[in-house]
């Protein structure tokens, strides 16, 4: 390739919401700032209000976008989506294809069968089999991920995810990098007292409440049911304790006493979550497994204490040397309740927090997305970066 060529990357993602979209948004912002040409293939079947602005941003930069109109389960429309993606690749001739999550990965890596030889980068955003007991469904999805992992370069976002990829899925270490998710450190900051008071007024939360926050959809992976059961127990001991939960889905099977239910603030969605972190005192995540939660990183940048299940993905945060983090085994209501109450008991000490400092050095755009850009240049074999992949799997953000 000519040395004067501008690096061109086609981003392929499904779903167009939640952490996957947030990751791609930030990555695209960074790449555009580095004068990288971007194209975008996406699906609006599972989407949020943040997807269209990203699409317009790519189009405004003078590049092509394509709506694949496909969901996360196999279906006949996938054939049409595949053919349209193939046509886009042949017309645009990008240097790199970067696919995000398993459906986009399957469509993109299928292009090899059609003769496309463009280097592929794959970010799985947590494997289905992580944190689950063996069974037919786990075996099926692990088999698919095994096939996906043999083609292209995999970027895992946590040590647990990277280890699972090698040990369970057979991903070669020389085809793998571990690079953290990143967030906009300018948007997520520790709130002033005035910002905290105003945020609570907006959401209808008392000024003097002690607020546990969570951003997670209701799903088996996120296991929000555990948090609700634990917070109900903690609320029976602390009458000033509140829960502020943002996420889609219904909590079934958890019965609350009236004096508990009235202290739960629930929203299905927030486009801009920065004010959410202004309103809370700690962030809790009760997942069974994670890739690497962007919501937890946003909490760190907002200087929030953390209460986490000790599970794959979350363990990455537990190993960072944070000053204000409490944990409990996954699925253990009693111990998660204890962690909540231990955090409440620690609050009067007003110990210095290192969360914002660690977030800045570990999860900033340059540290994380800069490492991704180095991989692009190494695989595309065009000049513009002096960085090359190491034998151990490439640039790594740790």
Image (tube, rainbow, N blue to C red):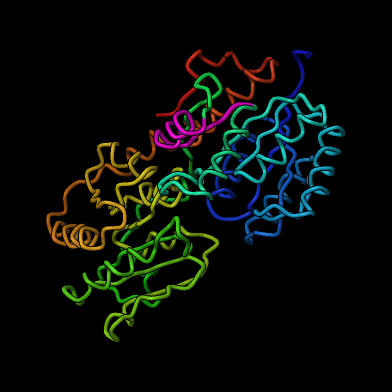
Residue 342, located in which quarter of the rendered image? bottom left
**Residue at left 47%, top 33%?**
168
- Report the side of 257 relative to 278 (left or right): left
Q: Is residue 147 left or right of residue 216?
A: right
Residue 168 part of the magenta segment: yes
Q: Is residue 90 left or right of residue 141?
A: right
For residue 52, above or below residue 182: below
Determine the residue positioned at 37% across, 40% down. 359
Q: Quadrant of residue 140?
A: top right
Could you tell me which quadrant the C terminus lies in? top left
Report the front residue among 33 and 387.
387
Q: Residue drawn 31% across and 57% down?
A: 331
Is 354 left, or right, of 168 in this rendering? Answer: left
Check the image and name the residue furthest to the front: 136
In the rendered image, which quarter is residue 204 located in?
bottom left
Q: Residue 348: give x, y in percent of width and height.
A: 13, 59
Whole-percent x, y for residue 73 in the image: 66, 54
Is 156 above or below relative to 53?
A: above
Placement of 272 over or under 105, stated as above or below: below
- Residue sitting at 37 percent across and 52 percent down? 299
The magenta segment is 152-169
Give x and y (percent) for residue 244. Answer: 37, 69
Q: Nearer the viewer, residue 186 or 49?
A: 49
The percent coordinates of residue 47 (x first, y second) are 65, 59
Query: Foreground: 275 or 95?
Result: 95
Is residue 127 part of the magenta span, yes or no? no
Total tally of numbered discs in the picture: 0
Query: Against 261, is 289 above or below?
Result: above
Which quadrant is home to the N terminus?
top right
């Amino acid at each position: 390739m000519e040395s004067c060529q501008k690096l061109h990357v086609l981003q392929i993602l499904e779903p167009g919401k939640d952490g996957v979209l947030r990751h791609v948004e930030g990555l695209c912002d960074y790449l555009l700032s580095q004068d990288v040409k971007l194209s975008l293939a996406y699906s609006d079947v599972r989407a949020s209000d943040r997807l269209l602005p990203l699409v317009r941003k790519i189009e405004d930069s003078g590049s092509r976008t394509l709506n694949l109109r496909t969901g996360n389960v196999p279906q006949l429309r996938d054939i049409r989506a595949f053919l349209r993606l193939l046509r886009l690749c042949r017309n645009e001739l990008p240097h790199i294809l970067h696919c995000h999550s398993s459906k986009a990965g399957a469509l993109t890596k299928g292009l090899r069968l059609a003769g496309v030889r463009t280097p592929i980068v794959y970010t799985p955003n947590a494997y289905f089999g992580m944190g689950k007991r063996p069974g037919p469904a786990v075996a099926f999805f692990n088999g698919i991920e095994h096939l996906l992992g043999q083609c292209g370069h995999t970027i895992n976002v946590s040590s647990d995810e990277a280890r699972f990829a090698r040990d369970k899925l057979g991903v070669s270490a020389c085809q793998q990098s571990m690079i953290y998710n990143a967030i906009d450190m300018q948007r997520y900051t520790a709130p002033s007292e005035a910002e905290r008071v105003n945020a609570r007024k907006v959401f209808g939360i008392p000024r003097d409440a002690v607020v546990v926050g969570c951003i997670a959809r209701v799903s088996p992976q996120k296991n929000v049911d555990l948090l609700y059961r634990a917070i109900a127990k903690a609320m029976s001991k602390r009458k000033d304790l509140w829960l502020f939960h943002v996420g889609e889905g219904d909590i079934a099977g958890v019965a609350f006493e009236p004096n508990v239910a009235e202290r739960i603030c629930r929203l299905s969605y927030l486009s801009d979550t920065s004010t959410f972190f202004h309103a809370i005192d700690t962030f809790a995540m009760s997942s069974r497994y994670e890739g690497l939660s962007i919501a937890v990183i946003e909490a760190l940048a907002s200087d929030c204490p953390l209460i986490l299940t000790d599970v794959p993905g979350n363990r990455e945060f537990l190993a960072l040397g944070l000053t204000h983090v409490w944990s409990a085994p996954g699925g253990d209501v009693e111990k998660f309740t204890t962690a909540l109450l231990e955090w409440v008991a620690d609050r009067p000490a007003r110990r210095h927090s290192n969360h914002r400092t660690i977030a800045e050095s570990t999860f900033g755009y340059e540290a994380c997305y800069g490492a991704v850009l180095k991989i692009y240049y190494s695989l595309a074999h065009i000049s513009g970066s002096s960085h090359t992949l190491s034998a151990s799997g490439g640039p790594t953000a740790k």
